[in-house]
Image (cartoon, rainbow, N blue to C red):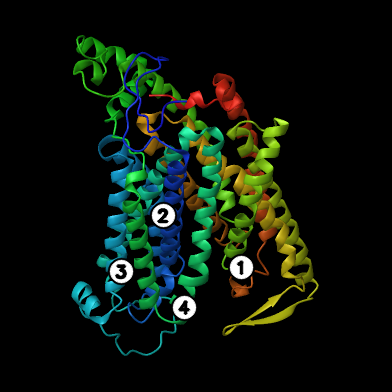
Amino acid sequence: MPPTGALEQPGRPGERRPLLGRGPRGPRPWRRTAGAAVLLVEMLERAAFFGVSANLVLYLNSLNFNWDGEQASRATLLFLGASYLLSPVGGWLADVYLGHFRAIALSLLLYLVASGLLLTIITDDGRRSFCGEMPELPLEPACQSSDCQRFWSSPYCAPTLYALLLLLALATSSFRSNLTSFGADQVMDLGRNATRRFFNWFYWSINLGAVLSLLVVAFVQQNISFLWGYSIIVVLVGLAFFIFLFATPVFITKPPMGSQVSSMLKLAFRNCCPHLWRQHSARDPQGAHLLPDQRSPQPGPSPQEDMANFQVLVKILPVMMTLVPYWMVYFQIPEAWLLLANVVVVLILVPVKDRLIDPLLLWCKLLPSALQKMALGMFFGFTSVIVAGVLEKERLQYIAANQTVSQQIGKDLYYAAPLSIWWQIPQYLLIGISEIFASIPGLEFAYSEAPRSMQGAIMGIFFCLSGVGSLLGSGLVALLSLPGGWMYCPKDFGNINNCRMDLYFFLLAGIEAVTAALFFWIAQRYERAHPSVGSQNPSSRDRG
């Protein structure tokens, strides 16, 4: 195990090298204080993030902006997608130029500015300053045809709102990709068990922030005003920023290691296209075989470490890529307010995992590696979708027999099957178990196996791939909602009683089964090539 706050210096592969870093290397209470500060900051940021995303459609639909549902939904999808897809950018900037500490601090500052501007444009004066006067709707007869055109195509204040949402997405994505590994660094010297427990409680903090947001921030936005709701969001971000800066003396901070992108691209080119590489080498005999670090000596990984890190990256990425279909399936389960049920289940299960399941697995020497736990998580995800499909098939049998009960929700009347909502508990319990075994060990795997010089980028790729899975899931629903698809039921008016969601769930189960088999095969190959992963040997963490 490297010393506390260590940053590995260039040297021969496999050599134990002197390590550098800033921050207290002293008593265990300081390390726990630093870890606790990170967890608190994460909880506050997640509460702010979900406070924006949960009611963004309603925010844009409000009388302040008067966007229609399609325009508001498109902006929400853009914000959520960008908040995941931009994650590698923030991680790479931290690895190359900023370091994790400065990247997190700048992300929180950008977060505070963007959320403050979103609050400002809720007010009449702020909105007029940034967006101008709202155009008045023309008085025209009601449209009787689907071919009617709007008086203007661009929604009010669109450039300003899209710019602020993209800035907020960049801030949250950079924050997410850097705080995860930064927090694990704070407790790394306490041992592998402390690192594992950190990721448990880090995930618990994420879900606690979501609960606080859904129960408090979203309630205030919907029942009091968006002005007060977004004021709470700004306070949450400001408090997170203050706590992070206040805890600076107890944090371990590490400088950036410089760019390895050119080296990685050269190595990828040489391995993928050896024939073209030989032609290029013939044209540049003096420099083509040299990596950038060989041409101009500078601090950072050596050429040998570049090659070792490239080989690690090539083996890590297939493992992470197989999680994309898992996330695609996972994000199709929680819908509407039932998202809260899933979050509550995770809040209950994480302490059980930390205090009971993990020690029991360790004592019984079962599932010693993160990859094996992730495979188990995929199995529970498969069973969750199967249970959801069986329940939906049972519901549709009641509908076919015309055994329904009417429910008035707002101004809309729905016809539901006479099944208790408690029948949905098994699928949410199973998806919760799946989440704690797939997501938490997934974070641990991305942290422990990534080369130190690419930690932020690898963690960013992990979060980016979860966003890709979510977008693919949305695309699958859109495809099946076309005429002739299982989800095409225009006559239901929101009841989905003529849709075949049972077949959709079984399709997801098939995707999950194939993904789990592929993941198991890739994970076995990875563990055979890296025995330390299976034995949870912390020395695997000592890469350059």
Secondary structure under tag 1 reads loop
**Mark earlier in primary sequence (4, 3):** 3
Q: Does residue 70 show up?
A: no
Q: For mark 3, what is the residue?
A: 118
Q: Residue at x 75, y 64 (%)?
A: 423
Secondary structure under tag 2 reads helix
**Mark earlier in primary sequence (2, 4):** 2
Which numbered disc, 3 or 1, marks the residue closer to the eye? 3
Q: For mark 2, what is the residue?
A: 41
Q: CA distance from mark 3 to mark 2?
A: 21 Å
Q: For mark 4, what is the residue?
A: 222
Q: For mark 1, what is the residue?
A: 489
Q: Residues within 10 Å of mark 4 (few under 14, many from 20)?
A: few
Q: Amino acid at mark 1?
A: Cys
Q: CA distance from mark 2 to mark 4?
A: 25 Å
Q: Nearer the viewer, residue 348 or 427?
A: 348
Q: Amino acid at mark 2?
A: Val
**Mark earlier in primary sequence (3, 1):** 3
Q: CA distance from mark 1 to mark 4?
A: 30 Å
Q: Amino acid at mark 3?
A: Leu
